[in-house]
Image (cartoon, rainbow, N blue to C red):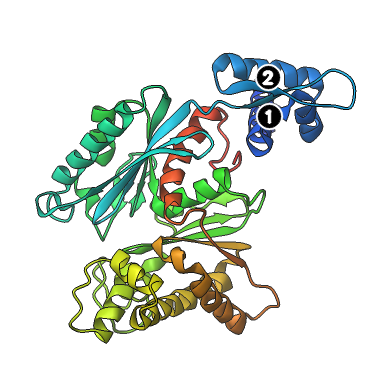
Amino acid sequence: MTSKQTRSSRGVASSETAREINRNIILNTIHANQPVSRADLARNTGLQASTVSVIVGQLIEEGWVLTGELGRLPRGRRPTYVMLNDKHATLAIDLRPAEANLAVVDINGKILGRETVAFSAQSNPRTKPKAALSDVIRAAQKLKASLRDRTFNGVGVSVSGRVDQKTHRLLFSPNAPWNQIDVYNELKKKLRGPIEMENAANASLFAERWFGDFGNVANVIAVSVSDGLGTGLLLDGKLVRGGGDMAGEFGHMPFAETGPLCGCGNVGCWETFASNRAGLRYYQELVPESKLSSFQQLLDLAVAGDIRALRSIDKMAGYLARGLCMLVAGLSPEVIIIVGDCTVLWPRIWPILESQLIARSFTSRIPRVVAAVDGDTARIRGAAALVLHKALFRTGSSETDEH
């Protein structure tokens, strides 16, 4: 290796790179502590007060930060608090097999408006994905138009499937074949602006890292429980994508030799035992005459105290716990986040999960198991966080480093 190659490989930061890093540190600190004074920003970041003042001034000029009320001190000059400008918002879309959930989410995670598109026989994504997407686009345009006072930074899309981050094409979407159409370009053409598209479980990780309270926890698994079952993996502080962006499809790991046919074409997959569809199937096995057609209906019965509905949820949670034990043994997470409608019954589900993790652990430590903030809105908030993060942070760092 030549001396020239040696010097270039050290990756010495330029002054411009250092400014960008400092800018991102300050943005993160404002986000975590707002409203916050410039003096507190300097204390919390270790940066010089003059550096903080210059960068905060730039962020105010760019429109990302606002000045707020004056603080109170025992003596001396009263500080001016600063905070993120919540006029910045994102249109977020969560694509599912039976419906799409849409929302406008501001920079602090507040949902400003929401809409659900239930797919009909004429717009079933299994058979007519383009018609289904057209319905979603119309609803998105209407929702966006209803909040014209906001500054939109793009469109975030959470989808039950794996997304190629280079081509933006869906690689794998077994429960609803969104991969049969070019979702990314259709949305970009009709909704305009930047489009960020991500697997639902990965999006949920973004939601918890940006809007949640896990701080600097570096090893987190998000398990998205819906019609299917997917996982997002944050290991050693890095989002794990694997070869071909396919890492995390633990819902399709072989769980039993026999079982219901899975959307991927195999039998015995974990998701056929632990997903919403599985819970609904368990109830129908107990009540053959049942006319329930959705997991939400099953949840409503369970919340009302129906014993057979509760037993069905318990069975689903038991299988979910068995799969989690495998993930814990192989990946050693510090935190497991459960994302899904089922978390409405968290006081009942959590003991089932924790008891199996304790019983099957071969160490004295088990991960903390928590429900995602606001249940399934984690997928929507995650879709928004994808866009806001990219708009806010301008360095080429890893996706989760600045969360």
- In this rendering, the count of numbered labels is 2
Work out whether residue 2 can be spotted: no
Identify residue for label 2.
55
- State the residue at coordinates (79%, 17%): 50
Q: Which of the two residues, 317 or 387, is positioned nearer the viewer here? A: 317
* Cα separation between marks 1 and 2: 8 Å
Q: Please tell me whether mark 2 sits on a helix, a strand or a loop.
A: helix
Q: Quadrant of residue 264?
A: bottom left
Q: Is residue 219 left or right of residue 248?
A: right
Q: Amino acid at mark 1?
A: Ile
- State the residue at coordinates (25%, 41%): 183
Tell me the quadrant of the picture where the C terminus can be found. top right
Q: Which of the two residues, 298 or 256, is positioned nearer the viewer here? A: 298
Q: Please tell me whether mark 1 sits on a helix, a strand or a loop.
A: helix
Q: Is residue 354 above or below residue 11?
A: below
Q: Which of the two residues, 300 or 403, is positioned nearer the viewer here? A: 300
Q: Is residue 303 left or right of residue 21?
A: left
Tell me the quadrant of the picture where the N terminus can be found. top right
Q: Position of residue 229 (x, y in %)?
A: 38, 64
Q: Position of residue 388 (x, y in %)?
A: 49, 33
Q: Which residue lies most toward the left here?
A: 122
Label 1 crowd (10 A; few <14 / some 14-19 / many >=20): many
- State the residue at coordinates (55%, 54%): 234
Do labels 1 and 2 touch, CB within 8 Å?
yes
Identify residue for label 1.
26
Q: Is residue 22 left or right of residue 172?
A: right
